[in-house]
Amino acid sequence: MIALACDHGGFGLKKTVTDYLEAKGLAYKDFGTFSAQSCDYPDFALAAAEAVASGECDRGILICGTGIGISIAANKVKGIRAAHVHDVFSAKATRLHNDANMIAFGERVIGPGLAIEILDAFLNTPFSGDERHQRRIDKITAIEKKYFK
Ligand code: RB5
């Protein structure tokens, strides 16, 4: 199950994303927003991030105007590694190296074609499992444990 969330700045691109997920037969849960009316991205980031952190969803997709605010908010949830990505290379690398469990991009930054290529790379690239990458992820978790209760 894929968690999906956006604010008004990402509402148009979310439709492109849901069309893609449906065409691929990938199940998703849409945490909103459900209109182009102005809203606050942390509300939607929180709902989707909690679904990923709890295991209800395996991965998550976040969209706002820039992808920045919604990724910052999601990364405050324990267990979330949300990657703010606008190119295919980084989408692959963040899966291979960081085992990112959420991806964020901005509707005001990239077009729908690139967004789908990025998403495709993100969803279809496994974590490398390399010891050095796992060690670094474990160190991120240790930072999280130190600062987030
Ligand atoms: C909304 O205007 C905009 O600030 C938001 O979508 C996002 O880009 C924030 O980082």
Image (tube, grey):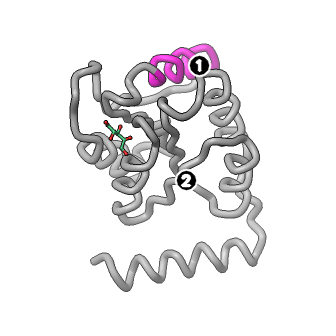
The quadrant of the rendering that contains the C terminus is bottom left
Kind of residue at badge 2: Ala
Q: Is residue 148 above or below residue 41?
A: below
Kindly tell me whether mark 1's CB lies below 8 Å from ligand 1. no
Marks 2/1: CA–CA distance: 20 Å
In the picture, measured across the screen, residue 113 lies left or right of residue 138, that is right
Q: Is residue 26 above or below residue 78?
A: above
In x, y percent, where is residue 106?
Answer: 49, 36
Q: Which residues are magenta?
A: 13-24
In x, y percent, where is residue 44?
Answer: 29, 40
| Quadrant in the picture for residue 78 | bottom left
What's the magenta bit mostly, secondary-structure-wise? helix
Task: Name the residue carrying label 2.
Answer: 83
Residue sticking out furthest to the bottom: 146
| Residue 1 visible in the shown view | no
Nearest the viewer among 53 and 20 is: 20
| Quadrant in the picture for residue 26 | top right
| Residue 15 belongs to magenta span | yes
Tell me the residue at 33%/45% (across/down).
Answer: 45
Nearest the viewer among 105 and 92 is: 105
Task: Name the residue carrying label 1.
Answer: 20
In the picture, measured across the screen, residue 24 lies left or right of residue 57, that is right
Contact between labelled residues 1 and 2, with CB atoms less than 8 Å apart: no
Mark 1 residue element: helix
Tell me the residue at 54%/15% (across/down).
Answer: 19
In x, y percent, where is residue 97?
Answer: 70, 63
